[in-house]
């Protein structure tokens, strides 16, 4: 029988240690399935399920499409795949990156909200930037429960802070207190259903995360073009008008929160600066080599001009390098 409840958890930096503490305190008869996304590299060996199985009483599995969701089991996102859920079933997808990650937290939270509504318990743990805030907002909008690790207890407080800033969170607590609360809330009867306005954006974004072409899924209906370009594919970013935290999507489906977009743009600025330094250094070397060749042919005036231009290039590179070593990437505003 499909459980009416599901727990979805998102974590990033510091998340593995937090999850070890959490799962070690969960009982073997936990009454709902648990799905977990932790930001991991595409080349990661993907052994989080093994780690969690060793530290707790619940079996943990690497998520695969078609797996049945069972109470008392943990399912973790595999490297380079989004983890999504439908009623009673698990799906994985190579859909476009969201907030610079695949797996990302928002797609899991969004799919859980669409499939389970008020039966979802969403949990945001330690991590950088703000992935999970928009998905937690969607869970709360559809009647689910929103839980956040106390930022003062989190090794990296940014994700919890942003979730608290943008969502009417139900519980904020340290990681050691989370397991008893999860047992309590998943054992309670579901709250009475409250009518919720239809949200066409939810189906569009779920289809994109599932791998459907963004244009076919209706991405152009999500919002208006913004002045910004997608850091992934350099297409125009649309400003999503779905409510909740400010977000952007491009025509190929990449999605960005404010903090993740600012971080990506900051990295782009640094890359551009070092590309300019490389070009100037290479130009100076080339000019010097040409000047040496010209001297051999006894054209001193032309050689002097080339040497001067080479020195100018080196001076420009030196000045830009000085600026680059003091360059601070822009940051999104911290949560208040």
Image: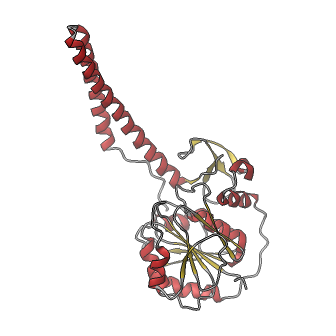
Q: Say whether residue 107 is visible.
A: yes
Residue 304 vertical position relative to residue 34 in the rendered view, above or below: above
Tally of numbered discs:
0
In the rendered image, residue 185, in percent from the top left (x then y), is placed at 62, 85
In the rendered image, residue 305, in percent from the top left (x then y), is placed at 26, 13
> Residue 209 sits in which quadrant?
bottom right
Residue at the image position 24 percent from the left and 13 percent from the top: 294
> Residue 237 sits in which quadrant?
top right
In the rendered image, residue 193, in percent from the top left (x then y), is placed at 77, 78
Report the front residue among 157 and 311: 311
Residue at the image position 44 percent from the left and 46 percent from the top: 266
Residue at the image position 32 percent from the left and 30 percent from the top: 282
Residue 307 vertical position relative to residue 192 in the rendered view, above or below: above
Q: Say whether residue 174 is visible.
A: no
Report the front residue among 229 and 65: 65
Residue at the image position 44 percent from the left and 84 percent from the top: 55
Left of 183 or right of it: where is 12? left
In the rendered image, residue 1, in percent from the top left (x then y), is placed at 73, 86
Left of 302 or right of it: where is 134? right
Residue 299 vertical position relative to residue 90 in the rendered view, above or below: above
> Residue 182 sits in which quadrant?
bottom right
The colour scheme used here is: secondary structure
Residue 223 vertical position relative to residue 167 in the rendered view, above or below: above
Left of 62 or right of it: where is 218? right
């Amino acid at each position: 029988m499909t459980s009416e409840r599901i727990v979805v958890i998102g974590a990033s930096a510091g998340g593995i240690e937090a999850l070890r503490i959490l799962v070690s305190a969960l009982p073997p008869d936990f009454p709902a399935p648990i799905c977990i996304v932790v930001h991991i590299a595409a080349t990661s060996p993907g052994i989080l399920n093994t780690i969690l199985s060793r530290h707790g009483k619940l079996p943990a599995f690497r998520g695969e499409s078609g797996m049945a969701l069972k109470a008392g089991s943990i399912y973790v996102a595999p490297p380079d795949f989004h983890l999504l859920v439908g009623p009673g079933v698990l799906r994985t997808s190579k859909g476009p990156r969201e907030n610079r990650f695949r797996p990302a937290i928002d797609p899991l939270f969004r799919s859980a909200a669409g499939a389970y509504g008020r039966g979802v318990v969403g949990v945001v743990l330690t991590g950088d930037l703000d992935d999970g805030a928009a998905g937690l907002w969607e869970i709360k909008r559809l009647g689910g429960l929103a839980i956040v690790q106390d930022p003062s207890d989190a090794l990296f407080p940014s994700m919890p802070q942003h979730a608290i800033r943008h969502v009417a969170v139900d519980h904020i607590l340290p990681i050691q207190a989370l397991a008893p609360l999860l047992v309590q809330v998943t054992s309670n009867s579901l709250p009475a259903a409250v009518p919720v306005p239809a949200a066409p954006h939810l189906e569009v974004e779920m289809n994109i995360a599932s791998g459907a072409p963004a244009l076919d899924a209706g991405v152009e209906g999500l919002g208006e073009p913004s002045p910004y370009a997608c850091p992934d594919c350099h297409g125009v970013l649309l400003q999503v008008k779905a409510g909740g935290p400010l977000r952007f999507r491009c025509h190929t489906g990449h999605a960005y929160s404010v903090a993740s977009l600012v971080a990506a743009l900051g990295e782009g600025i640094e890359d551009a600066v070092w590309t300019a330094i490389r070009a100037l250094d290479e130009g100076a070397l080339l000019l010097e080599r040409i000047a040496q060749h010209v001297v051999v042919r006894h054209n001193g005036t032309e050689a002097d001009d080339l040497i001067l231009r080479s020195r100018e290039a080196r001076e420009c590179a030196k000045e830009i390098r000085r600026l680059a070593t003091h360059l601070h990437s822009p940051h999104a505003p911290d949560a208040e």
